[in-house]
Image: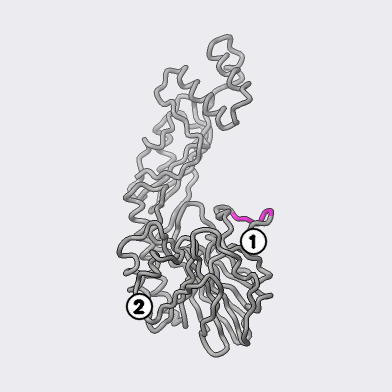
Amino acid sequence: MRLLLFSDLHLERGFAWAPPEVGRERRDALRRCLQRIAELAVQLAVDAVCCGGDLYEHDRYRPDTGTFLRDVFAGLDPIPVFVAPGNHDWLGPTSIYASTRWPPNVHIFTEQRLTPVSLADGLTLWGAAHHSPTSAPNLLDGFRVDRGGVHLALFHGSELGAFAPGGERAGESPQRHAPFRAEQIGAAGLHHALLGHFHTPRDAPDHTYPGNPEPLTFGETGDRGAVLITVDGSGSVQRQRHRVAATRLHDVTVDLDGVAHAEAVQDRVDAALAGVGGLVRVRLRGEVAPEVLVDPGRLRRPPAVTAWVVRAGEVTYGYDLAALRAEPTVRGQFVRDVEADPALSDEMRRAVLLTGLRAFDGREDLAVDIGDPDRAVV
């Protein structure tokens, strides 16, 4: 039995880090990604397609989202499609799952407990749905298969091993939706769990997280995409990952050490982005001369870059604080007072010092980036 697993597509996502036009492009890319998943399913001649939830975002879906999903899934007929709604696409009276007339090859799991569907003789798929965006129970508590054969589970949930010290991965949601422990899978009589929720891919002995197939933000890691799951008669699983993303996001670091004028900042950015296109996050770092203006809003975006996020929070300025601290001047007193203020965090102290010293220099560029916002500049 060959199954194609995906999850966490998040159709109609808001993309708060992007301006409206980039957000629209990203939402279009999510739709293209689902079409690529469907094309892959046909190409691989799979026996079924399984979605582990967060197919779309309930609070943002468009009037045509249900129609789009229906048509894509109908195009897969006779390949069956199984969907286990998650916390973002939870099953309720106003959900797409309740309002759309699905083709006969689509099965939406509707109960907040694991219920069975026969995939083949001796092979059962158990699926469940979230009924709200929060407080989903552990779907494996008290569950035990009630028949022979090979058993798979399809649901949206948080394997608690990821939250052990050192286990939680960067960018992973701290919210525990339908929390469970990996050892409960085998104890329930299940051979493998096909899961959604964690965006970082994971191939564990008894469960699989495919990860979000299309980039949702910068800094994502792991071989994410759709996963071809091959199950044999003993319940043994083999996995093969397939990239289905319509676009790529790039992270580029630009070293500004020693830069003495603003145009040199632009030169280094241009050199670092040579040959790079699409959506890019640029991290500016290094120490520049005090008189240099490092303003992300004034940088010229290379033509091949559709949109970018430029961060300047790691840029430092070459003020000689030791010399300034020793000055018997108002400026020197300002430095001493700021450095001695116990109420300031290191980050805030740096920002206050830099803003004040710029003001003493008569500069107009007083604003300092003390955060790390993902804000795109088109």
Identified at 52% across, 58% down, the residue is 134
- Magenta stretch in the rendered image: 165-169
Q: Amino acid at mark 2?
A: Ala
Q: Rate crowding at label 1 as few (under 14), some (14 to 19) or many (20 or more) other CA atoms within 10 Å.
A: some
Q: Label 1, on which residue? A: 160
321 versus 97 height, above or below: above
Instruction: Report which residue position mark 2 lands on.
Output: 74
Residue in the image at 66% along x and 66% along y: 181
* Horizontal relation, residue 305 to residue 210: left or right: left
Q: Quadrant of the C terminus?
A: top left
Q: Are marks 2 and 1 in contact (CB under 8 Å)?
A: no
On the picture, is 80 further left or further right than 286?
left
Q: Is residue 305 above or below residue 177?
A: above
What distance separates the C-alpha of mark 2 from that of mark 1? 36 Å
Q: Is residue 104 magenta?
A: no
280 or 208, nearer to the observer: 208
Residue in the picture at 45% in, 56% down: 216
On screen, residue 207 above or below 274:
below
Q: Is residue 232 above or below residue 40?
A: below
99 or 318: nearer the viewer: 99
Name the side, left or right, on which 334 lies relative to 364.
right
Q: Secondary structure at mark 1?
A: helix
Please state which of residues 362 and 27 is positioned toward the viewer in this rendering.
Answer: 27
Residue depicted at x 66% and y 68%: 182
Query: From this viewpoint, is residue 213 visible?
Result: no
Estimate the x, y position of residue 33 in percent, counting from the top left: 39, 66
Q: Residue furthest bottom?
A: 121
- What percent of the width, then of the height, locates residue 4? 48, 75
